[in-house]
Structures are given as structure tokens and as C-alpha cells.
Image (tube, helix red, strand yellow):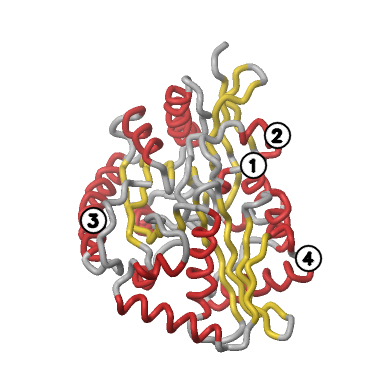
Amino acid sequence: MSLALRVLDRLDEVTAEQWDALLPSGNPFVSHAFLAGLERYGCLRESWGWQPRHLALFRGSRLCAAVPSYVKTNSHGEFVFDHAWAHAMARAGLNYYPKLLVASPYSPVVGPRLLAGRGEEAPSLAQALVEAVRGQRDTLGFSSAHLLFLQGADCATCDEADAGQWVARQDVQFHWRNRGWTDFDEFLGALKHKKRKNIRSERAQVAQSGLQLEWRHGCSLDDQEWAQVHALYEDTFDAHGNHAALTPAFLRHLGASLPGAVWLALARHRGTIVAMAFYVSSSDTLYGRYWGSRVNVPGLHFELCYYRGIEHCLSAGLQRFEPGAQGEHKLARGFIPVFTHSRHAIAHPGLRQAVAEHVATERAQVAAYRSELLQHSPYSTPAAPDSDP
């Protein structure tokens, strides 16, 4: 039976069992619980520039492959910045928006995007998805289609299945990887003396602050605690002039629907949560997502957002820790720069050529930047070269 393309305006048009069966790994940011939860609990709105338009390949009633995709009327919540491309189109009197985006909203997290399962047919289904994405761009008359934070296999599929149509872009994030340590002291022992001393000093400041620190499973929080966590999350976004897209109901939903995957590092003062870091995990990776604080305690951000996360990785046997986008300060705390990847199909030939020339120069600059950062590795012994995510 031949494949048929269907457009899903809501992910709830398919069941969690159908969708999650397509995932080649346990990455929570493309799970049905995460993506459908964003839609169901008011985190994605057309007025904010998000309109779900998931592409699904069916054989009869069986879902065979899919991509989480969205019509975007701005570039908010993407973390791969293309504002200069939009401005170039505007100067030429052309419209850059709307565009088609394949991504996990608000999540600069490396993971699968071409969801084609694990069977023998997976490579050909992934190729069909790439062609479907570009076909939708053309059918809708959009300026472009974008696949963000791709794993290596998805990068290769774009490059091979639709040769010459996808511009390759890369950037840098800071990730931690376990080099065989069993506890935090062993990790510290691998660092250079000055870095080790600074981390111990930061942790001592927090220990002496009088705050009570907790590491909590998301499903163990009650409604009052979730309200305090969400208020801290909102405070952080308000302080930076951004809107907090995730609703209290969505955070509670994640805590309940992703058992074993949602974690929080909390700091309390007289019983009230005054600072928090919000994490999501897969079977091998911890992802640091959000932070908020109403107290000014030296070292507290590093304690909740990095050191508690590293401790959890070591105790739970997780091999990677991705603490979020940007931040050179992470290098001194054991996080090493690695490349992240995206692919971009620009319809207008002139803009596509200009973008291709720009990202070629940008890739060289990003590679030089990463090489320079690695010269300042915090570790006494250099790690083996990191493979691409």
C-alpha cells in the first residue's frame, strides 16, 4: 500500500501510542506528551507566531512516519537565529514569513526530527519526510523550511535525499559528558586545580546561605509547589523582557505524564520555594531547561542549574548533560563546546545563494571559535574529541 501524506492541525489527531512508536530514541522533547501538551495547555498560539502543521505519512490507517512541524510568522522560540535573512527579504520587498519549521518548540535541544521508527524501512521513510517538508513549503508558497537541532542521521538524510536544496548551518552549545566518574569528587578530580577550587568555593557559599536544597521528582510536587515553580519561571522571563510561554497546567502535565523524566532542583527559605531549576531527562541525557530565583545568593545559579544536575547524572548513570543554549561561563564548570546542526531550504534562488555563502563563512568562524574554547578546557587531561550529537 502506498504512502499518503496527511496534515495534522493538532497532535491529538493521533494517539500517543501511534506517535511515540515512531521515535528512534527516548528523547522527551518530541514525545506526544510534550508536543501535544504544548498545544493542549495553551503554550502555542497563533498570536505568538505558532500554528501546528504536523506532517504524517500513513499506509491506510497506520501511521508510518511524521515530523513535528509548525507554520511560523516570526522566529520566536527557535534559538537558531535567522532575523538577518528575514530583513534581507524585507529589503527586497519580499515576505520571509510565514515559514515552515520542524522543531521542538522553545527547546534548543538536539534530538530526532524525522520520526520514522527503527525498522528496515526507516531510512526511506526519513527521505520521504524530507521531501514532504520541502513539498509543503512549495505547496503553501512559503519562503523557506527549517529543521533545527538535528542529530547526525537526520543531517545526512537532508543532504542525501534532497541534494542541493538544504543549506547546512552549525553553532555551538556546551555539553557535559561522563568520562567514567562515579561521583562528584571524581569529576572534580579531573579538573584543573583552579577550576576545582572555584567550584568548591561556589558550593560552599550556597551551603552557608541557610537555604534548604532539594532534588525532587516532578510527579512529587503538589499544586502549591508547582505554582511557586511557575512564578519563578515567569519572573526570569519578565526580567529579560520576554513572555513566559509555558503555562502552569503544562508544567504540571509534564510532571505527571513523563514519569521519571521531570526533575527539579529547589531552594527553600522558611518553607517557601525561592529558587528552582527545571530539568527533563531521557534514558541517557539530562536537559537543563528553566531557572528562576527571588534571592541573591552567590553561586546559587551554578549550584541548582549545573552542579545538582551533574550529581544527578552521576548517580543515575546518565552519560550527557545539556544545560541549554549559549553561555561561555559553562566551560569553567566542566561543559565542553560541541557543534549543533540545522538545515534550511530557501525557496528564492537569490536568497538561497546569499544564505549559503553567509553560512559557509559562519561555519568556519564557529569552528574556529570552538577550537579556541577547547584551548581553555577546564580538564587536566583533554577528553577524546566529541562526535557530533
Cα distance, mark 4 to mark 1? 23 Å
Mark 2 and 1 residues: CB-CB less than 8 Å, in contact?
Answer: yes
Question: In the rendered structure, which disc, 4 or 2, sits on the residue that comes first in sequence?
Answer: 2
Q: Quadrant of residue 250?
A: bottom right
- Residue at the top extreme? 1
Mark 4 and 3 residues: CB-CB less than 8 Å, in contact?
Answer: no
Question: In the rendered structure, which disc, 3 or 1, sits on the residue that comes first in sequence?
Answer: 1
Local SS, label 2: loop
Question: In the rendered structure, which disc, 2 or 3, sits on the residue that comes first in sequence?
Answer: 2
Residue 288 at x, y percent in the picture = 52, 62
Cα distance, mark 2 to mark 3? 42 Å
The residue carrying mark 1 is 32
> Where is 59 relative to 304, above or below?
above
Count neighbours of disc 4 (C-alpha within 10 A) and say few if under 14, some if 14 to 19, many if 20 or more: few
Residue 222 disc label: 4
| Left or right position of 382 against 200 | left
| Left or right position of 170 against 121 | left
For residue 2, say whether it is visible: yes
| Left or right position of 66 against 353 | right
The residue carrying mark 2 is 15
Local SS, label 1: helix
